[in-house]
Amino acid sequence: MADCIFCKIAQGEIPSTKVYEDDQVLAFRDLDPQAPEHVLVIPKKHIASVLALGAEDR
């Protein structure tokens, strides 16, 4: 999705400090941390909401 900041981070368009990465998820240090060890884990596939999750996403 063109305007999704998480998609841009997952695609490498916005730099981030990666903590972990595999074919489905990316974990990176938050760009504006609210705690000393603030790490976000996101799916690489854009999912608009929890209601949009399919069986293949579980």
Image: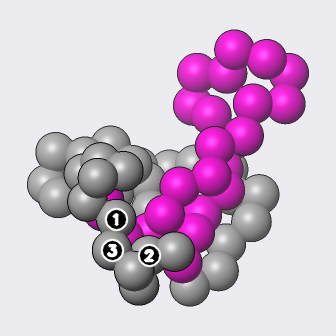
Residue 38 place in picture, x, y as percent: 75, 30
* Pointer 1 residue: 53
Q: Secondary structure at mark 3?
A: loop
Q: Is residue 36 magenta?
A: yes
Residue 57 place in picture, x, y as percent: 44, 76
Q: Are marks 1 and 2 in contact (CB under 8 Å)?
A: yes
| Pick the front one: 53 or 36 | 53
Looking at the rendering, the stretch of residues picked out in magenta corresponds to 24-47
**Residue at 14%, 54% in the rendered image:** 2
Quadrant including the N terminus: bottom left
Query: How would you rate the neighbour count of disc 3 (Cα within 10 Å): few for under 14, some for 14-19, many for 20 or more?
Result: few
Identify the amino acid type marked 1: Leu
Q: Secondary structure at mark 1?
A: loop
**Horizontal side, residue 13 vs residue 27: left or right:** left
Q: Are marks 1 and 3 in contact (CB under 8 Å)?
A: yes
Residue 28 place in picture, x, y as percent: 66, 50
**Residue at 84%, 30% in the rendered image:** 37
Identify the amino acid type marked 2: Asp
* Pointer 2 residue: 57
* Pointer 3 residue: 54
For this orientation, the residue located farthest to the left is 2
Q: Are marks 3 and 2 in contact (CB under 8 Å)?
A: yes
Q: Would residue 28 be visible to someone looking at this image?
A: yes
Which mark, by number, is residue 44? none
